[in-house]
């Protein structure tokens, strides 16, 4: 009888601890999202973006945000980059998104992306990318050019997420 009641006590006390762990994890994610928004806001203010249609605040929690300059060098990566790719923000800054591509990345999809960038048009693609550990993942990319308030192209922004569904070429 004692064994059952002691097991019951242990079981009842573990649930609140687990709940606190989840709560702590959620708070850390919120904190990271707010820090990311602050960084993006600083970039936006510095370059006087017209961010009306970008909906960054709505998307930054659930998607990885990458911002590149006009040479496609990454100048910002949201905190979700580590979870999706294994890379820290500091490891991707100054590099191009090509760092995530490899032998199984579809060449025709990359060509379509290049054409969209050259034409300064938004694009949506799902491509095979590579994590830091070499593992392949399906990356859904929703990218668009970003203009300043004077209508001059300033940057490119991509909202990315791992697509868990199988990609067929």
Image (cartoon, grey):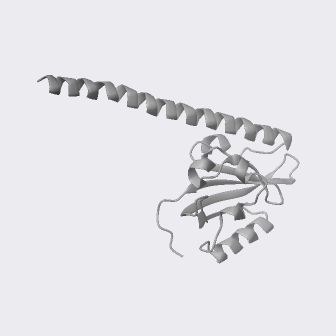
Above or below: residue 39 compared with residue 155: above
Query: Residue 142: which quarter of the image?
Result: bottom right
Residue closest to the eye, 55 or 9: 9
Residue at (54%, 31%) from the top-left corner?
27
Between residue 165 and residue 12, name the one nearer to us: 12
Tell me residue 152's x, y (percent). 87, 53
Horizontal placement of 156 versus 32: left or right? right
Residue at 56 percent of width and 33 percent of height: 28
In which quadrant will I find the N terminus?
top left
Q: Residue at x 21, y 24 (%)?
A: 6
Count up the numbered dots.
0
Q: Position of residue 164 (x, y in %)?
A: 48, 59
Residue for point 74% across, 67% down = 116
Above-or-below relation of 32 to 49 = above
Q: Is residue 132 visible?
A: yes
Q: Is residue 23 left or right of residue 115?
A: left
Q: Is residue 119 visible?
A: no
Residue 17 location in percent, x, y?
39, 27
- Residue 97 horizontal/vertical position (percent): 71, 61
């Amino acid at each position: 009888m004692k064994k059952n009641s002691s097991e019951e006590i242990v079981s009842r006390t573990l649930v609140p601890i687990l709940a606190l762990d989840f709560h702590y994890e959620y708070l850390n994610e919120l904190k990271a999202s707010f820090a990311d928004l602050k960084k993006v806001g600083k970039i936006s203010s510095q370059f006087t973006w017209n961010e009306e249609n970008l909906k960054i605040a709505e998307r930054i929690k659930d998607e990885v945000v990458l911002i590149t300059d006009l040479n496609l060098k990454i100048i910002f990566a949201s905190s979700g980059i580590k979870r999706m790719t294994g890379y820290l923000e500091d490891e991707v800054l100054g590099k191009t998104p090509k760092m995530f591509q490899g032998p199984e990345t579809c060449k025709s999809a990359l060509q379509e992306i290049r054409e969209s960038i050259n034409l300064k048009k938004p694009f949506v693609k799902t491509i095979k990318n590579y994590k830091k550990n070499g593992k392949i993942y399906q990356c859904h990319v929703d990218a668009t050019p970003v203009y300043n308030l004077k209508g001059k192209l300033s940057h490119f922004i991509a909202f990315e997420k791992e697509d868990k569904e199988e990609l067929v070429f």
